[in-house]
Amino acid sequence: MWLKAVPSFEVYTPSSLREVLSIYSSLDGEVVLYAGGTDLMPFMRRGKIRPRAVVDLSGVRELRYVRREGDLIHVGGLTTVHDLATSPAIPLSYFSIRWLRKYFGAETTRHMATVGGNLASGGERDIPAIMASLDGEVKIVGADGEKVVGPLGLTLSRGEVIVEAIFRDWGPGSVSWFGKFEKRASNGIGVVTAAVSMKAVDGVVEKIGVVLNRVEGRTMGRLTDLENALVGKTIDPSLIKAAVEESVSRIRPASDFRASSSFRKHVSKVLVRRGLEFCWSYLTRGGSVED
Amino acid sequence: MKIEFVLNGKPVSAELRGNERLMDLLRRLGMKSVKEACGTGDCGSCNVIVDGKLINSCMMLAVQARGKTVTTVEGITPEEKLHPIQSALLEYTASQCGFCIPGIIMTAKYIADNHPTADEQTIRQILIANICRCGGYTKIVDAVSAALKQIQR
């Protein structure tokens, strides 16, 4: 693949969210927000984006935080993946987030890529899947004020900025898992990714969230039929296997150069089953987990 | 546009164009250890340390280094001597064509600074940030392990 030179653009360096919004409103034409650049720079080098104006967000420090308020956890849009994964505000049993250290790119990528950037790039990214499995939401601000949207298939209109991702600690007896199947260790987009979050009380599943990267075509989605089949039940490996077979057989993932639809479907079944088994066994047996 | 930052322990100020990458600026300032290979954040040949964090200088805009502390191989090499990581790479003949080595030295420096007692598995997990197309990974990992022990002493 031939790379092009970085296109010429004007760069703006705001130091607050307010400044970002006012720069946006003062400019015509395409404006691109530059957070970690781990997607944007390769896109520019491949000629997919040719911005005339780039707003460097690295000075907007007010959007770098992971903080807990009650049982809500707020993650600022410019928090790096490394800072999210290692934050003491993340519940210890939320392995989906803490394991970002293992399966999200390399140390360099994690130091640069941001939570907001991962959410904004849409598509089959890790953070939208994890947030969706935890019923998380995303707060966006624009010229018309604030709005809160779901983490899946998120698209920003001109002038909008991701402020934060918000999710709830589901409390005692909850766990969150993430699995990825890909060709080159962690440094690539997964062929199949799955996020499973679960809460069980007194040996019964109270709440569950299951997300797959390709449910229909290239669209990431929750498997609500599978969730409904397991809520309120005491589950075991054979129930998990049957429910996964039933539900995941219905997905229609798109084929591409990395894997065929049927292969993706097979791996999807394996990953979702593993996730459910992990969560159930963690919650009911309190097994030790290799971190 | 003009920015100020600390490069290898010395404050510098530099004129730059908006679309310059940190890599471009560092090479322009004479830091020729910083190598461009893939240009898209996959290979680690351009790795440098910014405010204690290992990053790909091909994906950071130069302007993003304003007010920060940037360290390259030139900054960790003592005058007329070698850093223990460099000595170990030599001793283990871990460098073949050598193009990836500056990036690997910076990753190893990051490991030494943040995980000084890292075992082989941890070293391999972090060195995933670097590609060596000569394929000399085993010797590189051995050399980094030896260097960490040497630094600990």
Image (tube, rainbow, N blue to C red):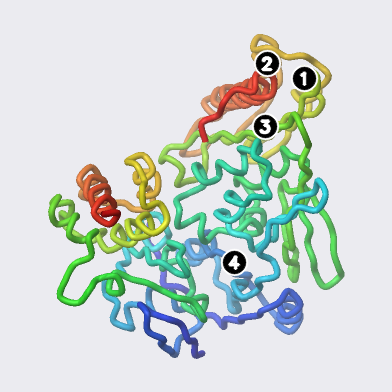
Asked if badge 1 and badge 3 are on a common chain, one would say yes
Residue kind at label 2, given as amino acid type: Ile
Q: Position of residue B1 (x, y in %)?
A: 51, 90
Identify the mark nearer the N-term, 3 or 4. 4
Q: Secondary structure at mark 3?
A: strand
Q: Position of residue A40 (x, y in %)?
A: 54, 63
Q: Residue at x 60, y 78 (%)?
A: A53
Determine the CA span between mark 4 and mark 2.
40 Å
Q: Secondary structure at mark 2?
A: helix
Residue kind at label 3, given as amino acid type: Val
Residue contact between numbered discs 1 and 3, judged by CB atoms under 8 Å: no
Residue A240 disc label? 2
- Left or right, B55 with respect to A26, comes to left
Determine the CA span between mark 3 and mark 4.
28 Å
Residue kind at label 1, given as amino acid type: Leu
Residue B45 position by quadrant: bottom left
Identify the mark nearer the N-term, 4 or 2. 4
Q: Secondary structure at mark 1?
A: helix
Specify the subunit that label 3 lies on: A
The residue identified by callout 3 is A196
Q: Position of residue B122 (x, y in %)?
A: 38, 43
Residue contact between numbered discs 2 and 1, judged by CB atoms under 8 Å: yes
* Relative depth, front residue between A251 and B102: B102
Q: Secondary structure at mark 4?
A: loop
Identify the mark nearer the N-term, 4 or 1. 4
Asked if badge 2 and badge 1 are on a common chain, one would say yes
The residue identified by callout 1 is A230
